[in-house]
Amino acid sequence: MSANSQDIKPTAKAPDAPESDGGRFAVPPWLRRAAGVSELWTFVILVALVAFFTIAAPGKFFTTYDITQIAVNASIYLVLGVGMTFVIITAGIDLSIGSVLVLAAVSAGEYNVHHGGPTAGWGTVVVCVVIALAVGTGWGALQGAVVATGKVPPLIVTLGGLGAALGIAELATGGQDPAGAAATHLQNSLGFGKLLGIPWMVILAAVVTALFGAVLGATRFGSHTLAIGSNPTAVRRAGIPVGRHLIKVYGLMGLLAGLGAVMWLASYGTTSIAGHSTDNLKVITAVVLGGTSLFGGRGSVLGTVIGVFIPAVLTTGLIVIGVQQYWQDVAVGVVLVVAVYIDQMRRKTRERA
Amino acid sequence: MASAREPLLAAHGVVKRFGHVQALSGADFTAHAGEVVALIGDNGAGKSTLVNVLSGVLTPDEGEVRLDGVPIRFTGPMDAQRHGVETVYQDLSLAPDLDAAANLYLGRELVRGGFLGRLGVLDRPTMRREAVAAFGELGVELKDVTAPVTTLSGGQRQSVAVARAVAFANKVIFMDEPTAALGVVQRARVLETVRRVADRGICVVLISHNMPEVLSVADRVEVLRLGRRVASFTAADTTIEELVGAMTGSLDEPAHNGNHAPVGTTEAEDGR
């Protein structure tokens, strides 16, 4: 057992100075803390990937077009990833996001179809957005309420939600993507519009990310989210309503899935009922790559940003250097398993300390 | 000097049943401000149940709890906390991934003033400053209040849990086996802390199995057996043998020790 050696070291050195204390004097605290931050390692990987592709395909990879394209492709996953970060930090999981996105998109799309179709006015667009956000939030909060009872694990609740939400969307549409689900106004503004050369999709994702990054890092809500994932019993004893908080967290995930639906409709103009079955895996992968612990209590939105961009950079990079992009799936899969393995090891050594 | 004083926390004839099991059958308890009271008893004597009743986790089926002489019925641990009664749980009840300051203020976070505060934005600088002050008051030095508590030693973690209780309790602190998981040096520090807290006029109720420890730190020892208080000793005047005797019931004759409170009476409290 490799963990044994780590166990013995501090004990052997205990008489004079514990090992960690020795390190504390040699290395400045900010550096030690930086090295302990998992985002840093993920960021190093991301930078290494970008550097590699830039060198491997000079003048081809690191162009404005590629960066914009990567960012637009990543923006929906980023929005979903922000919500998933909160969920996973509570030691939960949400497998249903792709289906919730579809359900929200179909709800908004059906309204649009019956209120003007592609040529619908701004009023309809606003109603569609509200519908998508409301459906997502409602579905998420409902799942959160079931999770909060503590009787059914989040994995099962959201697995059920995944099937049910998709089923309802298919019932409503007969399984066919409705034509005219997105108004031209929506597509031309959020979908293809730019501000100072930056696509609105990217700006929206960045605002959502910054906002909820601040919520997680600086507010009572964020602190309680981390605490619940860390030790729910302690949080309950401290008088914090854990169940209500979980409903909010899963509701937030749903809200962002609804926003993802709006973004999807805006950029692709269709509901893509069959196109979201692996959203959950992609997003969970990104969040975990970003250093958020599947066991709860630890994680950051910044890490998720990096985690979202690793697969995105890999895909684009592999295409640019002429390697089959399917290698991306292989690479991300391997990295994901390694990331969780490292997380587990750290947790074990920490708990023995 | 104490005999004339109203007890800070008192319980009379507390009964608690769990189905057919009677965990407490008329238990009494007395504690004064500024004293360390050890609550001892064999496994199943009802220590935990009594503490849960006194700290608001359980409501008694019968009997009365008085805080500052006023009959009180806590609706839950939060209610007890509002009345200045805190508990240090045996498992410490800390969030290991959060730092010491965040743990100190868990559920009672300080927020910024104005608009940001209404959004729930935390006032971390103040929380950290106050945390350092709270730890300093207990004689605990933490190198880094921003480090997750999981990176702290067992003794330091214990100190964080104790500091949290001390920071918010102004009447009573219950400590469940506070030294069970600690080494010799850390144990001494925690006991020192317990003493210091009591010197500030707070009553510390210590649940412990460690007899030498009980005698060294407690002012008084209350012994539970079969759901009742069977004896109450002044720690300075008793011995381990006597405590064990009372716990196991081999010293049941009340006349054996003058310092011995007969079952069911509270008037016979020793003067301390």
Image (cartoon, helix red, strand yellow):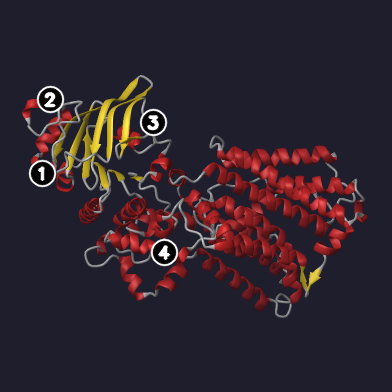
Pick the residue in front: A48 or A250.
A250
Q: Which residue is mark 3?
A: B59
Residue drawn at (52%, 44%) of the image? A242
Tell me the SS state at disc 4. Answer: helix
Q: Decide: is A3 above or below B224.
A: below
**Residue tagged by mark 1?**
B236
* Dot 4 amino acid type: Arg
In the depicted view, which residue is nearer to us: B145 or A308? B145
Whole-Å distance between the Cαs marked 4 and 2?
A: 52 Å
Residue A276 visible: no
* Badge 2 and badge 3 in a common chain: yes
Residue contact between numbered discs 2 and 3, judged by CB atoms under 8 Å = no
- Chain of the residue displaying label 3: B
Q: Secondary structure at mark 2?
A: loop
Q: Amino acid at mark 2?
A: Asp
**Quadrant into which the C terminus of chain A falls:** bottom left
Q: What is the secondary structure assignment of the residue under circle 1? A: helix
What residue type is disc 3 on? Thr
**Which of the two labelled residues, at mark 4 and mark 1, occupies the earlier sequence position?**
4
Q: Answer few, some or many: residues within 10 Å of disc 3's Cα (few below 14, many 20 plus, some between 14 and 19).
A: many
Tell me the residue that label 4 is attached to: B128
Q: Nearer the viewer, mark 3 or mark 4?
A: 3
Distance from disc 1 to disc 3, alpha carbons, whole Å, reads 33 Å
Query: Do discs 2 and 1 share a chain?
Result: yes
> Which quarter of the figure has residue A160?
top right
Residue B252 is tagged as 2
